[in-house]
Amino acid sequence: MRARPGRYGDGVSGSEEPAQPTARPAARPLVDGAALGQVGVWSGQFDFSPAGVVREAVAELDELGYPTVWTGEVKGREVLVTAGMMLAATARITVATGIAQILARNPLTMAAGQLALAEAFPGRFVLGLGVSHAELMQIRGVPYTKPLGQMSAYLAEMDRMATEQYRAVPPLVEPPRVLAALGPKMLELARDRADGAHTYFVPPEHTAAARKTLGSGKLLVPEQAFVLDTDTERARELARRHTGSYLRLPNYTNNLRRYGYTDDDFANAGSDRLVDMIVPHGGPEVLAARIAEHLDAGADQVAIQVLDYDRRGLPRRQWRELAPALLAL
């Protein structure tokens, strides 16, 4: 029996002519706020736990009722492998990459990974793509030149490869993809060539501007870091451990300048006003209020990154404690 024909060709190997590329549809059944939920979990800490603990932790997130978990890649596990591990360990939760680095794999490899996961776990995988940062690409020995041009060319080649070259059984529905985007031009590309944008290290004002650029019908998911601690001095110390690493990257500081932050705010791992904006602290009600700000500004979902005092720990206690307040939003 022939596999379902469509955008990805006919799903069989042989001498058949491949299907011709088609335009990406304006909206997709798999991308809507109701399916993904208003609050997801974002964590880069999974790399520091063995696979068995990762499976256990994401299964707990699923049981708690969190609808989406986001994870990325820097120098740890290959992110599509991680996504497959998480999907196989759970029954309902959507797994999203935040992000898969495009310069870490060629377009056919990325398309094949996306399509394989989408076919195996229908409606539960969102591919987030990004160019990443010059510093991280140097580690891989890959040139980082013009991010917008690199992303545009990559998306075109990825679509071509998915259509002309992929020969495994395709998913029944074209799976969604979002782009890591901060500046107006990358947001425009996310609007025109993807299903939306995943933003990171941003205030709610950026969410409002991003929604204006994306327009309606496109997914917008900002990340929001948080410290579950009412002790201001202690919480800010942990928050600065987080902000200090990102304030060394010009992509983030250049974006924050658009919203009135200056070199004084970037010094010493961040001024109090910057730290409290990027990484608020307090009880669950504080995080719920910040999530509401992003949602009111136009976010479809807010991906919370809860920081833990253990540098290599997973904030499982905090996820449990926050769940009743956040999942009631």
Image (spheres, rainbow, N blue to C red):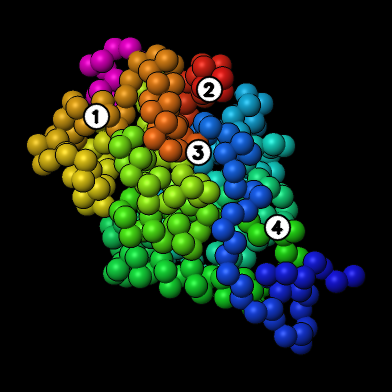
Query: Is residue 237 rendered to the left or right of residue 41?
Result: left
Local SS, label 3:
loop
Query: Is residue 306 rendered to the left or right of residue 157?
Result: left
Per the rendering, the mark at residue 329 is 2
Q: Amino acid at mark 2?
A: Leu
Q: Position of residue 212 (x, y in %)?
A: 38, 47
Q: Is residue 303 magenta?
A: no
Residue at 68%, 69% in the rendered image: 7
Q: CA distance from mark 2 to mark 4?
A: 29 Å
Residue under pointer 3? 300
Q: Position of residue 175 (x, y in %)?
A: 63, 56
Q: Which of disc 4 and disc 1 is earlier in sequence?
A: 4
Local SS, label 2:
loop
Look at discs 3 and 4 and give the one toward the viewer.
3
Residue under pointer 1? 275
* Pick the front one: 286 or 218: 218
Mark 2 residue crowding within 10 angstroms, few (<14) / some (14–19) / many (20+): few
Q: CA distance from mark 2 to mark 3?
A: 12 Å
Q: Residue furthest right?
A: 1
Q: What is the tally of numbered marks visible in this picture?
A: 4
Q: Amino acid at mark 1?
A: Val
Q: Position of residue 154 (x, y in %)?
A: 46, 70
Asked if the residue at tag 1 contacts the one at tag 2, i.e. Cβ–Cβ closer than 8 Å, the answer is no
Asked if the residue at tag 4 contacts the one at tag 3, i.e. Cβ–Cβ closer than 8 Å, the answer is no
Magenta-drawn stretch, dominant element (helix, strand or loop): helix
Per the rendering, the mark at residue 173 is 4
Q: Amino acid at mark 4?
A: Val
